[in-house]
Amino acid sequence: MPSSSIRKAEYDPESRVLSVWFVASGKRYDYDSVPPETYAAFRRAFAKGRFFNEHIRDHFPYRLVANA
């Protein structure tokens, strides 16, 4: 996943949880209720950080995962 802001992302289609690890902080956040179509579009996006900011951040409930 080449991105200057997102180090890694994983998606669980059963729970619809998108886990995102950020480059700057190293922290992981889990985003709930992310539709599979949104994740697929995120994976296809040329600018992952821009897509994340426009379509995921502040659109889905999230939580910081401790010690991730």
Image (spheres, grey):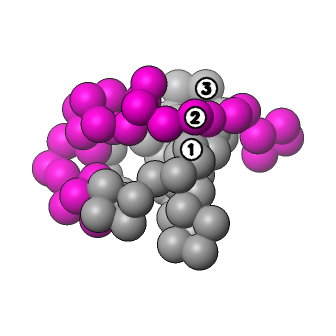
Q: Are marks 2 and 1 in contact (CB under 8 Å)?
A: yes
Relative placement, left or right, of 49 versus 9 is: left
Residue 25, disc: 3
Label 2 residue SS: loop
Query: Nearer the viewer's eye, disc 2 or disc 1?
Result: 2
Residue 62, disc: none
Type of amino acid at the residue the image marks with label 3: Ser
Residue at horizontal 23 percent and vertical 58 percent from the top: 41
Label 1 residue SS: strand
> Residue at the left extreme?
46
Residue 61, disc: 2
Residue 64 lies in the magenta stretch: yes
Q: Quadrant of residue 15?
A: bottom right
Magenta region, residue range: 40-68
Type of amino acid at the residue the image marks with label 1: Tyr
Relative placement, left or right, of 28 versus 41 is: right
Please give the residue where the numbered disc 1 appears in the rendered image.
Answer: 31
Q: CA distance from mark 3 to mark 1?
A: 17 Å
Q: Position of residue 20 (x, y in %)?
A: 54, 46
Q: CA distance from mark 2 to mark 1?
A: 6 Å
